[in-house]
């Protein structure tokens, strides 16, 4: 197959429609081809037996089909859980890499997927942010991560499948909203393989205000999680400088209020506890004031240490006091267990800088 052919899985459905119309074919053919790629995971145009031989020939002269390739797989046994957390390294058609994580808990198989290679927001506590930014992932590359993770699930227990998706891997999903939403459409549509309820999909953002407004108006039923990490503007700027300056706390609070009022859905406020930085009683008071202005629940998470980064996790006693203050303030608070720390698969630990095919 000539190298120069464009990889068809990188096209959005709209681009595929345009390409198919240039080949003189009706638009429903684009839908059929898209379904063969992202339902049947077709690896060759010959697989698409619903198409005429002539069209399959035209397609193979114009495009290649390149799905994500699994190049590394690590497992981290979790205390009290039969299934390990698994991290995979996937190679993309342009020889870049992305990481994704599979988390088994209770009756769930959660896929934690990436939306970008690296991240432009460069939060100093995050391994992905320290990589810098390479590029957005296409909708096909986002969907491809689910296929790759699902193969692991099915290999262990035929018939089992991914039950939930969280956009908490590498990158800021709301800086790649078009592709993220297209992938969600594919993953949740009845006409495609996974057919997941949008309520089982969570988009996690640092608070990209215009895109939160867009999401609120989109009619999507996905859940929204916002990484707050501080309820004081200055402190937030010290923890996540780019995001906090671009999306100031006051405006963020207003847009979250509008979002929860218009969708009727609570927002999850994610608060990463960093020792000596945002873990005092005053911090808890500021968080309670912020969170009481709209429908939300709070998710406290412990920091997962990263080599050469100065931030440290809090003692469990500090976390208990912080949590209790919020509960006493009438807020709904949970503590999120970290999975996959031993293989650097936990929150903020994903990074593919310098990764090469280990095979
Ligand atoms: S925490 Fe999220 S937004 Fe910040 S650098 Fe990491 S991936 Fe980007």
Image (cartoon, grey):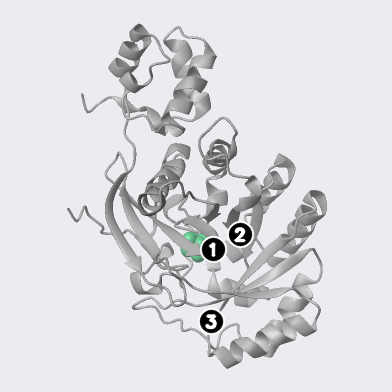
Disc 2 vs disc 3: which is toward the camera?
3
Q: Residue 271: x percent and y percent?
A: 61, 73
Q: Is residue 285 visible?
A: no
Label located before the other in sequence (1 or 3):
1
Helix, strand or loop at label 3? It is loop
Question: Taking 158 as reference, is 355 left or right?
Answer: left
For the residues marked 2 and 3, what is the alpha-carbon distance in whole angstroms?
22 Å
Q: Which mark is residue 274?
A: 3
Query: Do tag 2 and tag 3 residues touch (Cβ < 8 Å)?
Result: no
Disc 1 vs disc 3: which is toward the camera?
3
Q: Residue 215: x percent and y percent?
A: 68, 46
Query: Do tag 2 and tag 1 residues touch (Cβ < 8 Å)?
Result: yes
Number of other residues with Cα within 10 Å of mark 3, as a class: few under 14, some 14 to 19, many 20 or more: many
Question: Taking 23 as reference, is 183 left or right?
Answer: right
Q: Nearer the viewer, residue 166 or 158?
A: 158
Judge: label 2 CB < 8 Å from ligand 1: no
Q: Residue 347: x percent and y percent?
A: 47, 67
What residue is pinned by disc 2?
A: 246
Q: Residue furthest front?
A: 158
Q: Residue 124: x percent and y percent?
A: 46, 71
């Amino acid at each position: 197959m000539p190298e120069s052919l464009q990889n068809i899985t990188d096209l959005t459905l709209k681009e595929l429609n345009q390409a198919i119309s240039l080949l003189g074919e009706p638009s429903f053919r684009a839908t059929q081809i898209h379904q063969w790629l992202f339902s049947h995971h077709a690896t060759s145009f010959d697989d698409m037996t619903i198409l005429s031989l002539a069209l399959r020939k035209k397609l193979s002269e114009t495009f290649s089909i390149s799905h994500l390739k699994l190049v590394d797989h690590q497992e981290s046994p979790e205390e009290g859980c039969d299934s390990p957390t698994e991290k995979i390294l996937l190679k993309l058609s342009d020889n870049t890499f992305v990481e994704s994580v599979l988390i088994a808990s209770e009756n769930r198989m959660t896929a934690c997927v990436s939306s970008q290679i690296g991240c432009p927001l460069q939060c100093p506590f995050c391994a992905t942010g320290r990589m810098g930014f390479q590029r957005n992932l296409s909708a096909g590359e986002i969907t491809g991560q689910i296929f790759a993770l699902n193969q692991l699930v099915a290999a262990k227990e035929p018939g089992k499948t991914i039950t939930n998706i969280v956009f908490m891997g590498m990158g800021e999903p709301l800086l790649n909203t078009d592709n993220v939403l297209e992938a969600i459409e594919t993953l949740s549509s009845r006409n495609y393989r996974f057919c997941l309820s949008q309520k089982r999909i969570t988009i996690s953002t640092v608070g990209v205000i215009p895109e939160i407004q867009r999401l609120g108006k989109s009619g999507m039923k996905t859940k929204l999680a916002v990484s707050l990490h501080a309820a004081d503007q200055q402190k937030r700027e010290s923890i996540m400088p780019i995001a906090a300056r671009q999306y100031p706390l006051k405006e963020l609070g207003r847009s979250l209020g509008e979002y929860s009022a218009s969708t009727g859905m609570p927002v999850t406020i994610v608060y990463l506890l960093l020792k000596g930085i945002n873990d005092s009683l005053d911090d808890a008071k500021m968080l309670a004031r912020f969170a009481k202005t709209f429908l939300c629940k709070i998710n406290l998470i412990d920091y997962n240490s990263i080599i050469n980064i100065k931030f440290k996790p809090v003692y469990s006693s500090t976390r208990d006091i912080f949590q209790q203050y919020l509960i006493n303030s009438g807020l709904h608070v949970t503590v999120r267990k970290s999975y996959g720390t031993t293989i650097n698969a936990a929150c903020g630990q994903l990074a593919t800088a310098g990764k090469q095919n280990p095979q």
